[in-house]
Image (tube, helix red, strand yellow):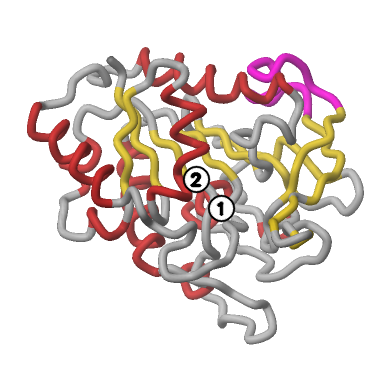
Amino acid sequence: MTVIALTSVNRRNALPYLEATESLGLEVRLLVPSDSDSVSTEDLMAGVGGLLLSGGPDIDPTRYLAAPDPNAGLYLDQTLDALEFRVLDYALQRDMPVLAICRGMQVLNVAFGGQLIQDLPGHKAYQEDGRWVSESHQIYLAPGSKAAPIIGSAGFFRVNSRHHQGLREPQKSPRLMATAYSVEDGYIEGLESPEHSWVIGVQCHPERQDEVPASFANLFRGFRDRAEAYPGSRFMTSTQARSQEDSANSHTGDNLLGSGSREEEG
């Protein structure tokens, strides 16, 4: 069975991503900071055929040489930053398939030398009757992008929005290609790396499948197909399997964002 790596701040935050990928027959190695700090990157990623970067807390602005904005309402997890940047570097060096969602797309931009807007209006989830509700808006997905034929077409789509950080062209890494934009305000909603075979980032949350067009589930199918074709992706040692099972069991009762109670935003 093909193995992919999924990064998350904790197991509960990872649940919708686990559902979206395991339902396609993928074996998921969940990487969370509390279990990964003392493990080498090579051991974390051994036998993996693809990397999925999930949504989550904000990225520490010092990662892109900016001072934290005291008015931005930042929620940081530097241990997650450390984990995701090192496994992403490992994957990029080996031209491994990468699907980067929300915070993951922002990690992708920062890893390639870009920056972020630390707080932006109108894009984050809001509370209603005691629950978090996604914003929604229209995006334009460009023809010629890798994502367009995977999803099924280019054009206009209404998608969810749960982030309060983002980027426009001035913050985008010059090494990345913007593939989708928010129609209302021009924020970038999709990124791809021309330097790699399959590195795709989206700002929306396709794992929340009732909030996006049904065709956006094809992003996970396309990711699966690429991971299955990646050399060395079908093997997991018994030690790695036991380690993954122990990790899953130890995080069953985690809160959504570890010690905090906020909904994931990135």
Q: Position of residue 45 (x, y in %)?
A: 24, 38
Where disc 2 sits, the SS reads: loop
Q: Is residue 47 left or right of residue 102?
A: left
Answer whether residue 145 is magenta in the image: yes
Residue ranking furthest to the left: 239
- Image quarter hosting the N terminus: top left
The answer to whether 156 is drawn above or below residue 15 in the figure is above
If you read the primary sequence from the N terminus, does the residue marked by circle 2 or circle 1 appear first? 2
SS category of the residue bearing label 1? helix
Instruction: State yes or no: residue 157 in magenta.
Output: no
Residue 240 image position (x, y, % from top left): 14, 34
Identify the amino acid type marked 2: Ser
Q: Residue furthest bottom?
A: 70
Q: How many marks?
A: 2
Nearest the viewer among 14 and 173 is 14
Q: Of residues 29 and 102, which is closer to you in this image?
A: 29
**Rendered location of residue 128, percent (x, y):** 78, 59
The dot on residue 54 is: 2
Q: CA distance from mark 2 to mark 1?
A: 7 Å
Question: Image height check: is 86 above or below 142?
Answer: below
Left or right relative to 98: residue 189: right
Over which residues does the magenta segment extend? 142-155
Quadrant in which the C terminus appears: bottom right
Q: Which residue is the site of mark 1? A: 103
